Amino acid sequence: MSTKRQYSLPSCNLILEGIEDVHAESADILSGQLPMSILINAECHLLKSNQKLSGGSVFLTNLAYAVSNYAQGFLSGLFSADTDKTTAEYPQVSISKVPDQHLHRLTLQPQPDQGEAKTEIDITTVELFDLVDAIDQFYADRSVLPNMTLELKPVSKRYRKPEQPLSERLTPIAIGISSLAFAAGALFMIPVPKTTPTKSAPLDQTTKTQPETGTQNQLPTKEPGQN
């Protein structure tokens, strides 16, 4: 009996169609479905790019290996010789960095004698890690193709880019410190400007007296004999 499993992420969906294992002793506890033992078709839908890749078990294995190996190198900064290497069996799957862009080119190369064209899809970093998450969910689901495993080898330190020598890394710091010391010494060499005390004007302690403005009004005196 055919069955389907889907692993959905915001920008990527991984859909697997296969045949149930009728001889399995127990079904999945959550879904109640029997384990999927044979894969018929695998589809990878990239929603933002509006693209789809599909194939059988070889396609799914090669896709998982190429994407997971590339993501490991992308996160660690250590890309081994196998990162850009295409898988041996067809359809071959590879992924590489797009120069001068924040994109990753996912390439599907079909078998040459089939007459199919090569497929190239430029995906964003968000789509890349959603695809990685979908693949991780698939391998964590032991009710789907339990015999399919993914083995990733840790990247050797010999692929690490040579670091800048210590003397070259300390040169800018030494130049900065010497420049700061030179500027501080130049400040001490500047003469301190002399200040001359200013004489304060003496306060005028004399008080002015205001003249009296009030006058007495004298009545004219009458002489005797005048009315």
Image (cartoon, helix red, strand yellow):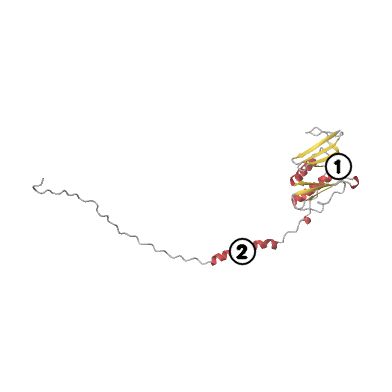
Task: Name the residue rendered at 79%, 37% in the picture.
Answer: 6
Which quadrant does the C terminus fall into?
top left
Three-letter amino acid code of the residue under disc 1: Ser
Q: Which label sits on residue 6?
A: none
Q: Picture quarter containing residue 210?
A: bottom left
**Mark 1 near mark 2, Cβ–Cβ under 8 Å?**
no
Q: Which residue is mark 2?
A: 179
Q: Which residue is mark 1?
A: 57
Mark 1 falls on what kind of element?
helix
From this viewpoint, is residue 183 visible?
Answer: yes
Q: Residues within 10 Å of mark 1 (few under 14, many from 20)?
A: some
Task: Name the residue rendered at 78%, 55% in the picture.
Answer: 159
Q: How many marks?
A: 2
Most extreme residue toward the left is 225
| Foreground pick, 213 / 69 | 213
Which quadrant does the N terminus fall into?
top right
Task: Name the residue rendered at 82%, 45% in the picture.
Answer: 63
Three-letter amino acid code of the residue under disc 2: Ser
- In this rendering, position of residue 11 left or right of residue 42: left
Q: CA distance from mark 1 to mark 2?
A: 65 Å
**Looking at the picture, how far across and down is residue 172, in whole percent?**
66, 61
**Looking at the picture, how far across and down is residue 141, in whole percent?**
79, 39
